[in-house]
Image: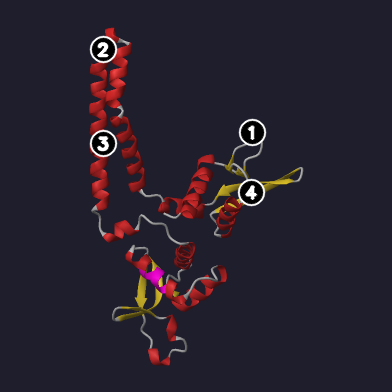
Amino acid sequence: MHQATELLISTLKKAHAAQAAILVHASGKSDGLFPRRTAESQAVMDQCLRDGLLELERTEAKGKTLLEWVRLTPRGWQFLQQATSPREVIQELLARLDVQEAGMAQWVAQIKDQVLHLANRLESYLLKQEEEWRGLKAKCQAALAKIQTTNASSAMNAHAFLPWQLDVLTIAEQHAQIGRPVCLLQELFTTLQQAHAELTLTSFHTGLLEMRDRGCIELLTTTQDISAMAEPEYLLLDGHHLHDALKRV
């Protein structure tokens, strides 16, 4: 995971933990998403606000400084859930257990030297703790092995969607709610480019195939005469199939 992505996810986690509006930059005794204003923190905030992951709740002038409070949006929470992998949580727990297990023998020796008259009682207690740690470690390793042997679709789901892909899901859901579940690819691409000017048609097609493989959308095969189409380049070629629309699964 890139450093910028890690900082983005860390920022969203802090916003979620706050359970309310939180200062962007710490001020006095008030905590914030960032300890101080830097070019890196400003870049992350600009991305969060631009992509709708955080929303500005209020501002307050304090001398020459403008204090800003932001809140995690539902879209930001959805992004955070998709970006957080159970693999990372289990690996972090295993690392901590390894540290504790490595220092176990030294800890036992120090306690025996300091309180010799309690050695037998303490040894029995610590051996029991060691057994429990090993049991927990074995369970974590089994869970990690299960995650690592899942199919490619499950592995893909450990990664977060790009902002424009989240917009695809939102638009498809809105179409379904008004009784128009089918979204034409040409209209969808034109709409997305208004908010994501950097999105290319090739990236759009590749991203839709990824979303299809992850079970989020269904790509619909065209029934039109290709030779009569004004702009056939919007068609998505998938093996022997040509798709011109999608709908939410």
Question: Mark 4 and 1 residues: CB-CB less than 8 Å, in contact?
Answer: no
Q: In the image, is residue 216 above or below residue 9? A: below
Q: Amino acid at mark 1?
A: Lys
Name the residue located 24 percent from the left edge and 32 percent from the top edge: 134
Residue that carries the numbered disc 1 in the rendered image: 29
Dot 1 or dot 2, earlier in sequence: 1
Query: Can you tell which of label 4 and label 1 is closer to the viewer?
Result: 1
Name the residue located 30 percent from the left edge and 57 percent from the top edge: 154
Q: Residues within 10 Å of mark 3 (few under 14, many from 20)?
A: many
Q: CA distance from mark 3 to mark 1?
A: 39 Å
- Which label is found at residue 232? none
Residue 89 in magenta stretch: no
Name the residue located 40 percent from the left edge and 49 percent from the top edge: 84
- Which label is found at residue 137? 3
Question: Viewed as shown, does residue 38 lie left or right of 232?
Answer: right
Secondary element type, mark 2: helix
Question: Mark 1 and 2 residues: CB-CB less than 8 Å, in contact?
Answer: no
Q: Amino acid at mark 3?
A: Lys
Q: Residues within 10 Å of mark 4 (few under 14, many from 20)?
A: some
Q: CA distance from mark 4 to mark 1?
A: 20 Å
Query: Can you tell which of label 2 and label 4 is closer to the viewer?
Result: 2
Residue that carries the numbered disc 2 in the rendered image: 119
The image shows residue 162 at horizontal and vertical percentages of 46, 62
In magenta, the rendered stretch is 205-209
